[in-house]
Image: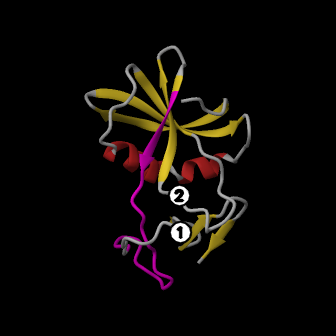
């Protein structure tokens, strides 16, 4: 499959999958959009979880998986997967969809150590805990929404 050209990306970490070390990254600028580094960093945990849970085969010689998906325009534009580009040792890429589990964060205060997560519909935004602000937030494609 083809993919938008990735101009810049942020390294998120290294995982071991299938006995191989694979670098995880997130695109910060492609041929069709750009986003700040902090947005790329916000997807680190759910992207790593989706890649680790992926049961399908990765393209041969995959050295890096870069999360490449544009920001969504509205809450109604649900996401049930991460779009990743599996890059080989020569920099050639193949698009792979990594399914994600949907979680629900309640609107009332919850202990940071014991968050309640329940399966929800695919239109539910992905809330993340902001340690500094001590509240949940999600990125709606153009700004952080706080709860």
The verdict on residue 123 being magenta is: no
Q: Which element type, helix, strand or loop, lies under badge 2?
A: loop
Residue situated furthest front in the rendering = 1
Q: Can you give x and y, in whole percent of width and height, for residue 36 in the image?
A: 69, 48
Mark 2 and mark 1: Cα distance apart in space = 7 Å
Q: Can you give x and y, in whole percent of width and height, for residue 111 in the image?
A: 40, 77
Q: Which element type, helix, strand or loop, lies under badge 1?
A: loop
Q: Earlier in the sequence, mark 2 or mark 1?
A: 2
Residue situated furthest bottom in the rendering = 108
- The front one of 99 and 18 is 99
Task: Please name the residue shown 65% across and 46% down the image.
Answer: 37
- For residue 123, the mark is 1
Task: Please name the residue shown 47% across and 56% down the image.
Answer: 80
Q: Is residue 128 above or below residue 24?
A: below
- The front one of 126 and 130 is 126
Q: Can you give x and y, in whole percent of width and height, for residue 130 in the image?
A: 54, 66
Q: Is residue 135 left or right of residue 63?
A: right
Q: Main secondary structure of the magenta part?
A: loop
Residue of label 2: 79
Crowding at label 2, few (<14), some or many (≥20) Cα neighbours within 10 Å?
Answer: some
Which image quarter holds the N terminus? top right
- The front one of 39 and 87 is 87
Region in magenta: 94-115
Q: Can you give x and y, in whole percent of width and height, for residue 131 in the image?
A: 52, 66
User: Does the CB distance between marks 2 and 1 fall below 8 Å?
Assistant: no
Q: Is residue 6 above or below residue 26?
A: above
């Amino acid at each position: 499959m083809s993919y938008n050209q990735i101009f810049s990306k942020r390294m998120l970490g290294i995982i071991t999958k299938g006995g191989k070390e694979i670098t995880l990254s997130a695109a910060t600028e492609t041929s069709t959009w750009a986003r700040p580094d902090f947005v790329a960093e916000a997807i680190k945990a759910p992207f790593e979880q989706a890649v680790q849970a992926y049961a399908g085969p990765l393209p041969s010689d995959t050295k890096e998986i870069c999360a490449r998906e544009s920001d969504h325009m509205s809450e109604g534009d649900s996401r049930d997967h991460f779009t990743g580009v599996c890059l080989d040792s020569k920099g050639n890429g193949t698009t792979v969809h990594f399914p994600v589990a949907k979680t629900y964060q309640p609107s009332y205060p919850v202990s940071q150590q014991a968050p309640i997560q329940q399966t929800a519909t695919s239109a539910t935004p992905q809330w993340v805990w902001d340690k500094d602000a001590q509240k949940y937030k999600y990125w709606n494609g153009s700004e952080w929404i706080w709860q």
